[in-house]
Amino acid sequence: MPTNAPTAAHTLSDVTASDSTLRRFLHGLPGVDAVGLEARAASLGTRSIKTTAKAYAIDLAISMVDLTTLEGADTPGKVRALGAKAVHPDPTDRTTPATAAVCVYPDMVATAKEAVAGSGVKVASVATAFPAGRAALGVKLADVRDAVSAGADEVDMVIDRGAFLAGNYMKVYDEIVAVKEACGTSARLKVIFETGELSTYDNIRRASWLGMLAGADFIKTSTGKVAVNATPANTLLMLEAVRDFRAQTGIQVGVKPAGGIRTTKDAIKFLVLVNETAGEDWLDNHWFRFGASSLLNDLLMQRQKLATGRYSGPDYVTVD
């Protein structure tokens, strides 16, 4: 169910010249055929991946995980242990790829950075008053600067869903632009929409284009803190958006589904979505991530089963 990006006479820079032009552009995006979208996502989820292709998919999925702990009870010891697991997910098998990143709160960035030093594993930090995003812009920007100054390679921000749902698109756009500037040149920006709160697929499409117009390096489904997080359908819709955005602008933007992806079977379904919708260019952890904590353990167990023929069970892996 391809999405055709609007072919307006004006350039995309003109789109953000005023609130009215931005609104006109976003509401001029094609409406989403919800039945068609969900049917395509379900159809792609039935693809059968076996043997060597499955082994490749598992290693690819491991390399795409943002291993995450975002709890009030996080301690330096827990973050150090998570960092060690990110670098060597299976200490008994050093052929297991490292994860893409460790994702923590800003006050734990320095600890995480030390834990993964020299490994190539990135440190991501949530910011902008995560997960609700209910704070003044100055507070949000201070949150970002704290994370970046502590060494964060990536920043995961949340949009102001209240402003978005009220139709105040320019406020959301300006906040993303300001956060992107606060990230400087050293940190990539992931923009979280909290798709479960946006109510409609049309809103998810508009949020995707809004985030990309404002300079997002990644668009991300969810915080993982609400009832509805990443789904095949909302991720498919965002993959269509990044594909169409690159076709129109030449700029490639990543996608990160987060929350609710717990099994190897789920992860492989999402990889099929990526390949069949955006294409092979996105099958790399520079452009696609899983926001997850429990997913990694199942990937490791399935990886060992392929290698040995035996299913080890949950005691084989660490409990995060």
Image (spheres, rainbow, N blue to C red):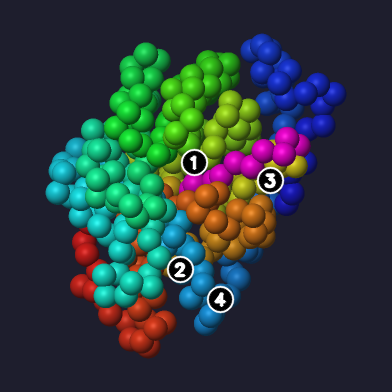
Disc 3, SS: helix
Q: Which residue is mark 1?
A: 220
Task: Name the amino acid, label 3.
Answer: Arg
Q: Earlier in the sequence, mark 2 or mark 1?
A: 2
Disc 4, SS: helix
Q: Separation of disc 4 and disc 2 at Cα?
A: 10 Å
| Mark 4 crowdedness (10 Å alpha carbons): few <14, some 14-19, many ≥20 | few
Q: Report x, y in % for residue 174.
A: 53, 17
Q: Report x, y in % for residue 307.
A: 39, 83
Q: Separation of disc 2 and disc 3 at Cα?
A: 24 Å
Which residue is at a point 39% across and 57% down the rendered structure image?
99
Which residue is at a point 53% across and 80% down the rendered structure image?
52
**In the picture provided, is 230 more to the left or to the right than 252?**
left
Image quadrant in which you'd find residue 170: top right
| Mark 2 crowdedness (10 Å alpha carbons): few <14, some 14-19, many ≥20 | some
Residue most extreme to the front = 118
Q: Which residue is mark 3?
A: 243
| Mark 3 crowdedness (10 Å alpha carbons): few <14, some 14-19, many ≥20 | many
Q: Earlier in the sequence, mark 2 or mark 3?
A: 2
* Highlighted magenta segment, given as a residue range: 248-257
Of circles 1 and 4, the one toward us is: 4
Task: Name the amino acid, label 2.
Answer: Asp
Disc 1, SS: strand
Disc on res. 59: 2
Q: Which residue is mark 4?
A: 53
